[in-house]
Amino acid sequence: MHVSSGLGLIGRSGKVWQDTKPKGISPAWVVGFGGNARLTPRGGIEFRFELEDYVSQAQFNVGLPTQTRALLHHDLVWSLGISFPILGRWK
């Protein structure tokens, strides 16, 4: 298991984000949690999972099109996978 944090980038586009500023890529604070579990006795193949929360500020419409307010926004990303060694054996 592990916990991580750092800086990341978020890119927003499309109709749902047309009133949101800034356009394009925005910085975000990233908090992550993950882990892995062995699927073989010797540890060569592992099941991995990750959950990350990209916390950023986005401008949201709060009524009229001219009324917007900056609010915190959470973009959650989760992934599942299997990892295995390609060159040699893991120790």
Image: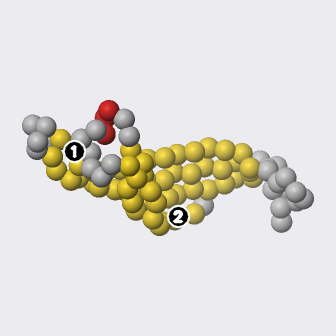
Residue 71 shown left or right of residue 7 in the figure: left
Q: Which residue is mark 1?
A: 60
Q: Earlier in the sequence, mark 2 or mark 1?
A: 2
Q: Which residue is mark 2?
A: 3
Residue 5 shown left or right of residue 39 in the figure: left
Residue lying at the far top of the rendered structure? 15
Q: Looking at numbered disc 1 in the image, what kind of residue is underneath it?
A: Phe
Residue at coordinates 31% horizontally, 35% vertically from top-left? Answer: 16
Q: Looking at numbered disc 2 in the image, what kind of residue is underneath it?
A: Val
- Give the quadrant of residue 19: top left
In the image, is residue 67 above or below residue 72? above
In the image, is residue 42 above or below residue 39? below
User: How far apart in space, not on screen, are marks 2 and 1 (Cα)?
Assistant: 30 Å
Residue at coordinates 42% horizontally, 48% vertically from top-left? Answer: 11
Residue 73 shown left or right of residue 87 in the figure: left
Q: Residues within 10 Å of mark 1 (few under 14, many from 20)?
A: some
Q: Quadrant of the N terminus?
A: bottom right
Element under label 1?
strand
Give how far across and how far down residue 2 sits, in percent.
57, 63
Q: Residues within 10 Å of mark 2 (few under 14, many from 20)?
A: few
